Amino acid sequence: MHTVTIVADDLTGVLDAGHSFAERGHETVVIATPADMISRSRPRSRAVSRPRSGAVIGYNTDSRYRSPSEAADRVSEAVTALPAATTYKKVDSTLRGNVGIEIDAALRSAGAAVAVFAPAYPEQGRTTRDGTHYVDDEPIDATTYAADAKGPDTALLTDLFADLGRPVTHLSLDHVREGRVHVRAELQAIAAGADEPPIVAVDATKPSHLATVAAAIRPLNALPAGSAGLAKHLRLSEDATEAVSVTPPDESGPLGIVGSVNPETFAQLRRVPSEAVFTLEPAALVSETVPRETVARVADRIRSGEPAVITAATDEKAVERTVKAGERRGLVASRVRDRVAMTLGMTGLAVIEAGAVSGLLVTGGDVALATLRHADGTGISLTGTSIAEGMPVGRVMDGSLAETLLVTKAGGFGERNALRDYFEWGG
């Protein structure tokens, strides 16, 4: 049995949550490609097909944009296949994906008495008060995240579970401020009064609130569910050593693959020198064609020790051009997104194959997963170091990218200089 199993619906999310344990010295391995752990009869990688007992294991179900039924099945299979002393259901801090149904599936499969849902991540501007979830003090359903294909249509946490037929309630900040003993007693009373394991949505506006929640549930038979914000406060029983710092090789430049179209990512790209940014053409993106001339130019720059970024777009207009290029090919928006991720992944891998890189940064979980799949990579070992909050450093365990230092970042995470900070670290 593992110490902790983290089940997340996308790759950047599980890496971010996993880092919460790795930075405290706990060995943490992430299974990046969904079928590899579940399908034990056909493991593609002996390096990660059977992680050792006692380790912290992260598992990417890649279910954010799947149908609700498929998402539930993937979560149930992962929880069942990876038993642990603590199962952590990682959810997106902006409530994208099949949030309610995945927590419900995890609760059923884990056999817990209660699910404690606290998606706040105050360090990234995600807070919950009076049961309503906010990003930078704006209700989540009024932000750009709501426009996502699987974005939230409500900011009220309990509404996410309205169709499940399961008891759902809310624990306010007033209760959280009373401390861990009070919160624990409230959770026990709620669970005892329900006819089946309930889901309790909890307010939090400060890291200390999440620390209180984590301490309250530690002795309980509970399923914690939340973002990396809650994960970083979950304490494990065994002692751990300090994480070892990681230094990238200095003979070549770092490569960034930027697939996110979040406005925050565009702002971060604007802080990168223009000569380092290579934007792929819409026609190539939707046709899954690797632009060989661009690959050669980027590889030359990397070999000279300079950083480079491959991106699908630097502004909203570029996104619109790519969508229109896809429409001309008869592609719906979801297929355009998939093809863009695949093309970015293939192009980035072609650059790496043309010459060594000091490290690889990928924004967007779908792009990170596409890159690993093209490289036949299935596992990532987290080093416990990070570039900044929400930018963990891992090492690819297998495939053609084996031993490559990989930094991942969700599109909406990071300060305006996040990409520049990575290049300074990697260069």
Image (cartoon, helix red, strand yellow):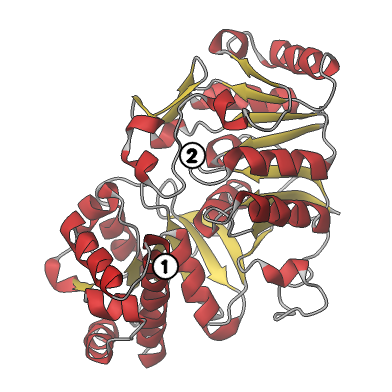
**Residue at mark 2 to residue at mark 1: CA–CA distance:** 24 Å
On-image quarter of the C terminus: bottom left
Residue 138: x %, y % from top left: 33, 26
Identify which residue is drawn at 63% across, 22% down. 212
Circles 2 and 1: CB atoms closer than 8 Å = no
> Residue at point 37% right, 77% down?
343
Residue at which label 2 appears: 93
Which type of secondary structure does the marked residue at label 1 adopt? helix
| Dot 2 crowding, Cα within 10 Å, few <14, some 14–19, many 20+ | many
Q: Position of residue 45 (x, y in %)?
A: 70, 80
Q: Can residue 356 be seen from the camera position used here? A: no
What is the quadrant of residue 137 in the picture? top left
The three-letter code of the residue at mark 2 reads Ser
Q: Position of residue 147 (x, y in %)?
A: 35, 43
Q: Which mark is residue 273?
A: none
Name the amino acid, label 1: Arg
Quarter occupied by residue 290:
bottom left
For the N terminus, the quadrant is: bottom right
Tag in front: 2 or 1: 1
Q: Residues within 10 Å of mark 1 (few under 14, many from 20)?
A: some
Decide: is 148 above or below 246: above
Residue 135 quadrant = top left
Q: Is residue 72 above or below residue 288?
A: above
Which secondary structure lies at badge 2?
A: loop
Disc 1: which residue:
335
Residue 110 in the figure: left or right of residue 405: right
Q: Nearer the viewer, residue 228 or 337?
A: 337
In this view, the residue farthest toward the left is 274
Residue 415, given in percent of the width and then of the height, sits at: 30, 45
Which residue is pictured at 75% across the width and 72% down the height?
A: 49
